[in-house]
Image (cartoon, helix red, strand yellow):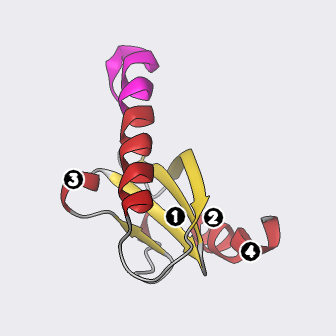
Amino acid sequence: MVKRFDGQFHALTILGADYCNYERFKNLAGEGKPLWEFKEHAHRWYCLRQVAQGCKVVTIILFNGWVKEKRGKTDKENREIEKAKALYQEFLVESPGGRPR
């Protein structure tokens, strides 16, 4: 798994807040906001992308990952997005001040 996502994390480390790759690292639309998705072939990781005020430093909080089995949007994909959103809500409750930094 490390080798699969190493290039994306390396690019994120170098480019910071400027890194966005619509095929491999993008924000989720609609009900999935404000979550982001790392994609590498069938593997998916849902996360929160936080940009520090006044700089390009990015913090990534990974919530969950899964392996997509078919083409197109599936029920499992919707369930995994819902699971990530629930973990995000839990994060908001437990993070200092009740919101992301």
Query: Of tags 4 and 2, which is closer to the observer?
Result: 4
Instruction: Sort mark 3 into few (<14), some (14-19) or many (20+) by Cα contacts within 10 Å.
Output: few
Q: Which badge, 4 or 1, comes first in the chain's sequence?
A: 4
The picture places residue 30, in percent across and down from the top left corner, at 18, 59
Mark 1 highlights which residue?
A: 16
Residue 70 percent location from the top left of the image = 50, 79
Residue bearing the label numbered 3: 31
Which contiguous range is marked in magenta? Answer: 89-101
- As displayed, is residue 2 above or below residue 95? below
Calculate the distance from the C-alpha at mark 2 to the C-alpha at mark 1: 6 Å
Residue located beneath label 4 in the image: 4
Amino acid type of the residue tagged 2 in the rendering: Thr
Is residue 61 depicted above or below 1 in this figure?
above
Q: Are marks 3 and 2 in contact (CB under 8 Å)?
A: no
Q: Quadrant of residue 69?
A: bottom right
Q: Is residue 54 magenta?
A: no
Q: Which mark is residue 13?
A: 2
Foreground mark, 3 or 2? 3
